[in-house]
Image (cartoon, rainbow, N blue to C red):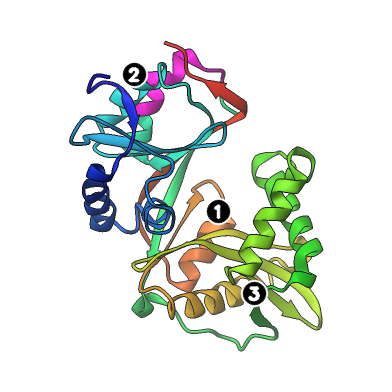
Amino acid sequence: MSDDDLRPAEARDRATLEAWFRAAPVEHCFLLTQLENHGLVGFHVLGDPPVAGAYVRTGRLLVPFGPRTGGRELARSLAGADIELRYVVGPLELVDEFWAGIRDQVPEPTWLRRNRLYAMESKDLLPATPPAQGRLRASELGDLPWLARASSSMDREDRGVDPLEEDPVGLERYIMWLVHEGLVFVWEEGGRLLFKAQAACLNRRAALVEGVYTVPEARGRGVGTHAMRALCRGLLGRAPLLTLYVNEANTPAVRLYETVGFRHVGHYRSVLFSRQVAVKG
């Protein structure tokens, strides 16, 4: 194996990865959570000591990390690594370099999105006006059918795919895990669930907010704003920093996050394929 080969990370690499991720906890919230909770499982690196790398869930997800120039090196190394991918996400310039290196070897993606990266500390959270009519609570097992339907509707709107059709068992297991860990929250008014969101990535430095969805009939009347504000207040009691990223073309979502106090701090790039693809050199 040469330094140009992508290799599974080993114990001697951990200090380097921790230093990278802790130096930029907003940008690397997901990666830091994986490292803290699951160790080196899924992490691959280039070089010894590492000069770049990627977190990989084969057939599903690739999250590159390292300097911008590492994107090209990762692309070159991927062909011989027997890794399939479907979704790539990470810092804009790094993913753009990676994409430039693989675009001629893979099908056209379903999307190639530029996303706004946001951050929030306690001082950023803006006050609520007028008072809310509902309440945010941690989800319960009895919410599972509604959460599955809401997740399905969210993905159909955002990705054009239905997880209840693609992988209903996987979706149910994931939601059950979120509920069990106390990481998914719902907004309730008069016994009706109108909003959901989750903090699937939570580490000692930051929490990543994901899966934000307001039912169509509740949009435009402040439900999302009140729910997000309550969610942020609660999560900031568990982590000193919140982060999220959103498709910058999604104007209502951008407006929602900025209304509650999220600060625009950078950009991500995300690439989604309609199916699993392998990079061939």
Determine the residue located farthest toward the front in the rendered image. 11
The label nearer to you, 1 versus 2, is 2
Q: Cα distance, mark 1 to mark 2?
A: 36 Å
Answer few, some or many: residues within 10 Å of disc 1's Cα (few below 14, many 20 plus, some between 14 and 19). Answer: few
Give the residue type that dot 1 points to. Thr
Q: Which residue is mark 1?
A: 251
User: Going 58% across and 68% down the picture, which residue do you hit?
Assistant: 181
- List x then y, in percent, for residue 221: 69, 73
Q: Nearer the viewer, residue 231 or 21?
A: 21
SS at mark 2? helix
Q: Cα distance, mark 3 to mark 2?
A: 48 Å
User: Going 43% across and 53% down the picture, which residue do you hit?
Assistant: 38
Answer few, some or many: residues within 10 Å of disc 3's Cα (few below 14, many 20 plus, some between 14 and 19). Answer: some
- List x then y, in percent, for residue 172: 73, 54
Q: Which mark is residue 176?
A: none
SS at mark 3? loop
Q: Nearer the viewer, residue 221 or 203?
A: 203
Marked residue nearer the N-terminal end (1 or 3): 3
Q: Is residue 213 visible?
A: no
Query: Which stretch did the figure color magenta?
Result: 98-108
18 displayed left or right of 29: left
120 displayed left or right of 246: left
237 displayed left or right of 76: right
Q: Check if mark 1's residue and mark 2's residue have beta carbons within 8 Å.
A: no
The label nearer to you, 3 versus 2, is 2
Q: Which residue is mark 2?
A: 76
Q: Which residue is mark 3?
A: 222
Marked residue nearer the N-terminal end (3 or 2): 2
